[in-house]
Image (tube, rainbow, N blue to C red):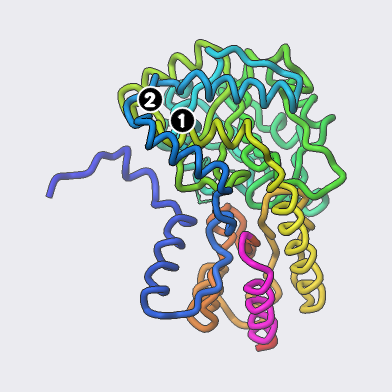
Amino acid sequence: MVKLSERIGCISPSPTLQLLKIKNTMKKQGKNILDFGAGEPDFATPDIIKEKGIDAIRNNHTKYTPVTGIPDLKDAIRKCYMDEQGFLPDEEQIIVTPGSKFGLFLILQAIIDPGDEVIVPKPYWVSYPEIVNYSDGKVVYADHLKEDALFELTADSYIEKFSDKTKAVIINSPSNPTGMIMKSEELKKIISACVDKNIFLLFDDCYRKIIYADENFESPLKLSPSSLENIAIISSLSKTFSMTGWRLGYTIAPEYICKAMAKLQGHSSSNPCSISQKAAVGALLEDQSYLEPMINEYRKRRDFIANRFNEIGNISFVNPDGAFYFFADFTYYINKLGFKDDGDFAMDILNKLNIIVVPGTAFGAPNYLRISYANSLDKIREGLDLLGEYLKG
Ligand code: PMP
Ligand code: GLU
């Protein structure tokens, strides 16, 4: 056996993706799993998108593509941001990647030198600190677990962590796992602070179309288009279009950043899947009337869970404004039932109820659980009935 690199020793497997593995193993054992684990839409990829993928195969669009993506997909992305946010990126300011996770990986590899600090929101999506670590950066947390402003994505939470070594900040709005949206005045403030100090702002807008609140989603490109020199948008088709397996994301960033990312993409994945790229053009340009019913359904589930949590009692949470997760504090029950921590608690729930939830520690928030409602209302009802009984002890 060869010795593994020190670099790979610095990161752990993705806990959210490991849950998918557990789910598949339990399914094979014939168990009825109630899965509120990994954030993957339960809806099928819409037919209109699937058809575009099938057409791509039939028309032999099955070869290497340009490293940064096919021109018609870049045009579709440009049109989409122009229509939505009044910002028209140049073709050279876009790089299409196999999932937005890989876009994030490429950009951090491209801009981080050893010891550079990257400010990551906490609670965080599981891959942020790991990718920063893998890029030899130092993770510094913007704390969103403060009692008086629980989960609030404030500019100051980042600015107070600025140092001479700060190279980049990551903002995720709507947030995974909290569902919070960064308000426009906060976003303006952090953009201007980043421009001031020449800090790069990575804005992950994967969930920007999945919003329930009156609160509008605010984008840096709309609020401060002249700041693109300091901003990258990291985005994905996975969630909005139920396309997790197609692996399709993109980054909008200054041209020199996209070029640097393209060097690494050219020597690693080569390009995103040719078929997925054609399907993505369909997703962005064809009729999207399926979106509203999907979001209404997510909203129904969100409201249902909020009501049930209130009925069960002693679970504290903030109603999510976007994405499809409840991030709730179960300290009362972890103590009452005598568990060591949220990991043991989640494991007992899995073993006794066949319910998959993600322990908060995976997101840097002990005693919380993340409950994904990318699952049917029937399953959610069944799961919460079981959980309610279980919590009575
Ligand atoms: N950002 C956030 C906040 C996420 O939750 C995810 C998980 N899907 C991603 C990025 C990556 O998504 P993908 O690679 O499927 O585009
Ligand atoms: N982002 C989703 C989640 O948080 C999917 C799994 C992953 O990529 O981490 O569950």
- State whether the magenta stretch is mostly helix, strand or loop: helix
Viewer can see residue 370: no
Residue at 77% from the left image edge and 79% from the top image edge: 312
Say if 189 sits above or below 153 in the image: above
Highlighted range, magenta: 374-391
Task: Judge from the rendering whether residue 172 lies leftward or rightward of residue 246; answer left or right.
Answer: right
Say if 287 sits above or below 147 in the image: above
Q: Confirm whether the magenta stretch covers residue 228.
A: no
Q: Secondary structure at mark 2?
A: helix
Say which quadrant the C terminus sits in.
Answer: bottom right
Contact check, label 2 and label 1, Cβ < 8 Å: yes
CA distance separating discs 2 and 1: 8 Å
Label 2 sits on what residue type?
A: Gln
* Image coords of residue 295 (percent x, y): 73, 52
Q: Secondary structure at mark 1?
A: strand
- Label 2: how many Cα within 10 Å (few below 14, some 14–19, many 20+): many
* Image coords of residue 31 (percent x, y): 45, 80
Q: Quadrant of residue 159?
A: top right
Q: Which residue is mark 1?
A: 97
Say if 183 sits above or below 321 in the image: above
* Image coords of residue 306 (percent x, y): 78, 66
Q: Which residue is mark 2?
A: 265
Residue farthest toward the right in the current orientation of the protein: 214
